[in-house]
Image (cartoon, rainbow, N blue to C red):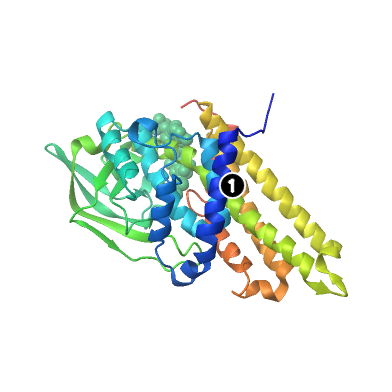
Amino acid sequence: MVDFTLTDEQKDLREMAHNFAENEIRPVAWEYDKDGTWPQEIIDKAWEVGLMNTHIEEEYGGPGLDYLSGCLIEEELGWGCSGIGTSLAANGLAAAPIQVGGSEETKKKYLEMLTESPKMAAFCLTEPDAGSDVAGMKTRAEKKGDKYVLNGSKCFITNGQYADFYTVYAKTDPDAGSRGISAFVVDRQDGITIDKKEDKMGQRASNTATVTFNDVEVPAENMIGEENKGFKLAMMTLDRTRPGVAAMAVGIARAAMEAAADYSKERQQFGVPIAMHQAIQFLIADMAVKVDASRLLTWQSAVQLDQGIRNTLTSSEAKRFAADSAMEVTTDAVQVFGGYGFIKEYPVEKFMRDAKIMQLYEGTSQIQRMVIAREILLPRNV
Ligand code: COS
């Protein structure tokens, strides 16, 4: 039997996240967006109430929430402001490889660092010349005695400027393609330079920076998992985090739909509220279908994780569909607002700008289609 009923605990969590988004995030979101300000105050409050590091297991001080609960929270944060939501959620992306492949010592040291105080972490995969093509990365990690020495540059790194540690992917065997990449936990230290805080179209309250490693020495025990197995670790990480990104896209789309529906009942044209016109009704109806269908796929991909079922297919389906739907819904919401939708006095232009990144980060919509097609055409057991 398929039962979409949430537990009382899940309902409470969703309500708590919604209230946080409504009372703490929304009142300041447009200011943070305008100035591209780092939302430290909100991060501190979110950490305090338990809206960060939600998947970290109880033994390392986290709440050990299931993935479905995580998606409920991320939808509400995305509804509040997906820029701030991304800042809050990025620790989850950086922690996931440690949870999947880290040694007991690494888990204890770094996961507890996040749960003991509001510290930040960043996931460093993308490079200027290696975005979709992960295996094309150039960052090197060379073994020297009981250390690895890292050199290279990672770009578009969420929370890059504020991270206390980084999970970094680097080539340990440069001639072996995807089979020559290893992952490391790297403490913030001299030798790491942070620059180029990006001035972005949307999600302006999240920090996106370039992080460069100049002869950074990392103890060999900071390798996550086995040498040259980092590519798989990255893919397994993204399987786990894409449902959360999809959930955030659902939140953005829902926020835009609600704004458009409310506005359509107020705005009068041709002597009636525009909600009386079928042209507007059909736009709103299609928004509702996209929001609900996106959420269903998102929940499915999360529940599979909770059940220990490989979710590569559904997590890419959810991310693809929810991200593209968020772009469509927010664009249509601007349409419902007409000329007013195009100006910053109204909320929907921000939703539209924020939605765009959902089709780009954690794998573009085209990469999701590649993953989906491969899973259908060449299913593999990994
Ligand atoms: N789980 C476990 N292992 C996986 C996996 C998954 N989801 N996906 C792939 N693998 C394994 C494969 O089984 C293969 O293993 P072997 O070396 O043992 O054969 C290996 O990884 C290489 O896989 P593949 O041949 O499919 O790699 P490609 O270089 O063709 O790349 C894509 C695959 C394009 C899907 C991958 O590079 C990707 O996801 N790119 C997007 C990255 C991204 O999301 N970037 C955004 C920044 S992160 S915030």
Q: Residue furthest top?
A: 1
Which image quarter: residue 214? bottom left
- Rendered-image quarter of ligand 1: top left
Pinpoint residue 316: horizontal percent, then vertical percent.
55, 41
Give the residue at x 57% y 44%.
14
Q: Is residue 273 above or below residue 64?
A: below
Secondary structure state at the residue bearing disc 1: helix
- The quarter of the image holding the N terminus is top right
Residue 190 pos. (x, y %): 17, 56
* x and y percentages locating residue 185 in the rendered image: 27, 42
Q: Amino acid at mark 1?
A: Arg
Which of the 4 quarters of the picture holds residue 26? bottom right
Depth check: give the residue in front, 173 or 20.
20
Q: Residue at x 27, y 41 (%)?
A: 184
At x 41%, y 61%, the residue is 39
Q: Residue farthest to the left?
A: 145
- Residue sticking out furthest to the right: 271
Task: Tell me where residue 278 appears, x and y as whole percent.
Answer: 86, 61
For residue 184, above or below residue 36: above
Most foreground residue, 145 or 31:
31
Check the image and report above or below for 107 versus 185. above
- Near mark 1 (Cα within 10 A), the count class, few <14, some 14-19 or many ≥20, is many
Q: Give the residue at mark 1.
A: 320
Left or right, 264 with reference to 4: right
Is residue 79 visible in the rendered structure shown here?
Answer: yes
